[in-house]
Amino acid sequence: MAAILVVDDELSMRQFLKILLEKEGYEIALAADGPGALELARQREFDLVISDIRMPGMNGLELLAELKAECPELPVIMITAFASPEDAVTAMKNGAFDYITKPFNVAEIKGVIKSATARKNAGISTPVEDEFPEIIGQSPEMLKIFDLIKRIAPTPANVLIYGESGTGKELVAKAIHNHSRVADKPFVPITCSAIPESLLESELFGHVKGSFTGAIADKAGLFQQADGGTAFLDEIGELTPIIQTKLLRVLQEREFMPVGSTRTRRVNVRIIAATNRILEEEIMAGRFREDLYYRLAVVPIRVPPLRERKGDVPKLVEHFLRKYSRILGKEVQTISSYGMEVLMQYDFPGNVRELENIIERGVALESSNIILPESLILSLHRQERESAPEPAPGAMFVAAENENELFERGMEEILVELEKKMIRHALKRADNSKMRAADLLKISFRSLRYKTKKYGIA
């Protein structure tokens, strides 16, 4: 019998959940506030905690942090009558098993509770390839992304996916949609750079008959088609200032106006955007609105280039071999060990898309059932690694030659010098992306921007 701790400052809700769950065979303990719940959790072991978010004193998010600090494996379901994307994102980032809004569907909460207690008691874990069949990857870098997808997918928060071309940003967007509460609703993608500027507004917002030459009938745009589901805006950095302003209105007011119409239309859509540009630089150059950036990047996800997750290359090769052997009518079953070694030493400037192209070409050229090195045609524009050796970790941060100099200069000057060097080094490691550099430095993007301006770091 699974033991569940229910935490809610409303007596009626505690009693309702107690009656409901005891009928399902669970053992229920009740707490009216965060401190009381912590005391009970320290006295005995629970299989699950169900906690309200809005409570006096210690709120549910604070309780979640305390519980996870003491027992990381304990599943916690957050419930609230005051749903907000910010709370949902915070809860899922901090390790909540799920986030449910009141009034909730009884069948839904029963299903979530059953899943949570089963995992805790039986150690049930779904293989990654079953949970994310659309994405090939089991490297630590990809496992972190899978975990983040599971945490944010049930929330309504907007997501910004960034990374180099060919890394699979649209696959990540589809995975978020497929694991969301609106997976049965439309997922509508659009590539902003693929549509002429003159037509993009109509593609996004639709138009009414007669609004321009050739508009012979009303047309529903991306947001109307995706209503209730997810709109995926790829290459978001290509939007013009006018379209950016109109998109900001969709995000803020949940409404838009079709081209040629005088009537606004309401829309309930989650927006997932993607870019291979460094949007912070676009903001600094005045080409991208800062307020739009923060509306889109409620949850930012960086998809690493293939050269940073080489452990996924063998699995990807196996997948593409099966795919193109079937498509091309070949029986190429594997790749030679030397062929695999060649791929493992390659940097893949075109990322997963380039690897797929290499394997497709190899299958087409190969006459036997094994791909040999001579069938692997790699890019002529291969990125060469810098010949200069990397300095020893921390060596670039030495601030003084000896102890006397250290104290003559004083702590404030030394710390400023160290800060400057760390910022410059992080920017170099992050290819001058302030967002990625801020991640490396464990500070916010705003803090990094302030410090670079303060120290005059370009």
Image (spheres, grey):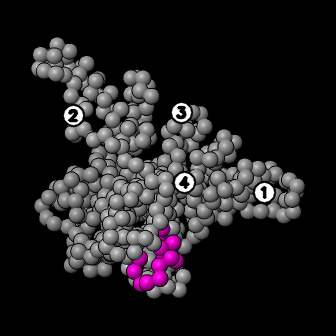
Q: Quadrant of the C terminus?
A: top left
Distance between the alpha carbons at the discs numbered 3 and 4:
20 Å
Depth check, front residue: 43 or 416: 416
**Image coordinates for residue 306, horizontal then vertical, percent:** 40, 59
- Are the residues flagged by discs 3 and 4 in contact, CB closer than 8 Å? no
Q: Which residue is mark 4?
A: 273
For the residue carrying disc 4, how many other residues have a C-alpha within 10 Å: few (<14), some (14-19), or many (20+)? many
**Label 1 amino acid?**
His
Q: Is residue 408 above or below residue 259?
A: above
* Residue reaching furthest to the top: 408
**Label 3 amino acid?**
Met
Image depth: mark 2 or mark 4 in front = 2
Depth check, front residue: 100 or 103: 100
Q: Which residue is mark 2?
A: 395
Distance between the alpha carbons at the discs numbered 4 and 1:
23 Å
Q: Helix, strand, or loop for circle 1?
A: loop
Q: Which residue is mark 1?
A: 207
**Label 2 amino acid?**
Ala
- Asked if residue 27 shows in the view, the reply is no
**Label 4 amino acid?**
Ala
On whether residue 368 falls in the magenta region, the answer is yes
Image mark for residue 284 = 3
Q: Which residues are magenta?
A: 358-371
Q: Mark 1 or 2 closer to N-term?
A: 1
Q: Residue at x 23, y 74 (%)?
A: 123
**258 lies left or right of 165:** right
Q: Mark 3 or 2 closer to N-term?
A: 3
Q: Quadrant of the N terminus?
A: bottom left
